[in-house]
Amino acid sequence: MAALARATDRTENVGSAEVRTTTEMPATGPVSMNGTYSWGHGLAFDVEMDTKAVRMQQVHAAAKTRMVFVDGAYYYEVDPQPSGPLKGKHWMRIDASAVFGDKGAQAFQGSSGAGSPAASMRALKYASNVDDLGKETVDGQSTTHYRAVVDKAHMGKFKDAYGDRNNAFGSMTGGSESITMDIWVGGKDLPVRMKQRFGSAVVTMDFEKFGATAAIKAPPAAQTGDVTEQLKKSAARQQG
């Protein structure tokens, strides 16, 4: 559809946005994240979320926890711990490979990486069918609602990240044989809302403002403790 092609090009060109995101999974329930997403040079985001909802009260006392994803790694704001890898540290680092596996983590790299709004829009061209569900008002804006299903054979990098039942994400969602995408496109040929279903996971993104966002950078290495290997070993024990 021409309207979706225009929206895909515009989304790719703006490169960043302020976004409200809600992720729902059976194991965690809904988790809301508000902040900045960037996708010009690979997926990156800088968001705040409810500490209790992400079960981080043991390492962070504040009601809200900041999370940064950049250069293929997650960084969680934590309180300095008395011992272990987070001793005296303010940030906890987890490489994406601990969540999505080595191949899945590589899918997020580069300007064509999975996970970004632009990548989701690009995936629509591989959908077996795209339905125009008509006009709807979303966040006070007049939009056109489209729905598409991308099967596993055409998921591309999404398959590496979300379709593997053996990685941590797949074990929580059951893996994904297809992606169902609902996209509401506004008058400026940009998405107003995007909802994606990966297995039993549902991710909804509401776009507040596009472009002109601050650059996203990793926290200082001296303030960061890496727990990637501990998580990988723990996951291996659970699967073994």
Image (spheres, grey):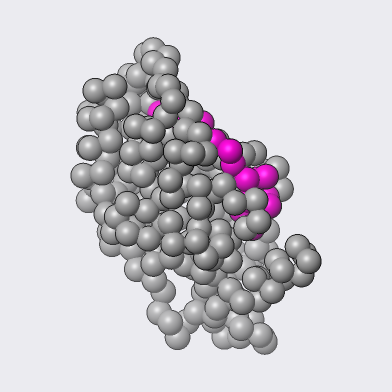
- Between 112 and 139, the residue placed more toward the observer is 112
Whole-percent x, y for residue 82 in the image: 67, 86
- Between 237 and 24, the residue placed more toward the observer is 237
Q: Residue at x 59, y 51 (%)?
A: 164
Answer above or below: position of 172 versus 232: above
**Residue that extends furthest to the front in the rendered view of this protein:** 153
Q: Residue at x 37, y 53 (%)?
A: 113
Residue stretch in magenta: 168-183
- The picture quadrant where one finds residue 188 is top left
Q: Residue at x 32, y 51 (%)?
A: 112
Image-based side of 192 in relation to 240, left or right: left
Whole-percent x, y for residue 58 in the image: 70, 68
* Magenta stretch contains residue 223: no
Image-based side of 15 in relation to 194, left or right: left
Q: Quadrant of the N terminus?
A: top left
User: In this view of the protein, can residue 203 be seen by the observer?
Assistant: yes
Answer above or below: position of 239 versus 154: below
Q: Residue at x 50, y 61 (%)?
A: 103
